[in-house]
Image (cartoon, helix red, strand yellow):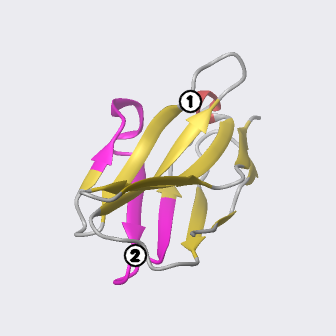
Amino acid sequence: QEELVESGGGSVQPGGSLRLSCARSGSAFRPYTMGWYRQAPGHERELVASITSVGGTNYADSVKGRFTISGDNAKTTVYLQMDSLKSEDTAVYYCNLKGIGFIKYEYWGQGTQVTVSS
């Protein structure tokens, strides 16, 4: 059983930066991905960025060049550095852990609000 604990959300002006953190508590079977999804009011949840247990990364086109996902060596904590934030980045951001090999599983964090507004 895994628990994902998120931190780092908040309010910022356009052009500002925030860093989200997601810490997992268990020993996830490899391979897996850890990532961030977001959901704005009236929209479906969408992938923002993800990182695999071997360090491969993937980004939504809308955040490429502005957001950076990274993790510690053991990938027990994953970070999402968000720069040059725009109003359209406003959403609830959810951490996700997913088993992508023979053993399938999926866990979600509780969500953290990011608001970009002047």
Neighbor class of circle 2 (other Cα within 10 Å; few <14, some 14-19, many 20+) is many
Residue 66 image offset from top left, x and y in percent: 41, 46
Magenta run includes residue 19: no
Residue carrying label 2: 75
Name the secondary structure under disc 1.
Answer: loop
Q: Decide: marks 1, 2 in contact (CB < 8 A)?
A: no
Say which residue appears at 52% left-offset and 42% top-offset.
Answer: 37
Q: Which of the 4 quarters of the picture holds residue 70?
A: bottom left
Give whichever of discs 1 and 2 has the lower sequence position: 1
Segment tinted magenta in the rendering: 58-80
The residue under label 1 is which amino acid type? Arg
Residue carrying label 1: 45
Q: Which mark is residue 14?
A: none
Residue 104 image offset from top left, x and y in percent: 37, 53
Say which residue appears at 75% left-offset and 35% top-offset.
Answer: 117
Residue 4 image offset from top left, x and y in percent: 62, 65
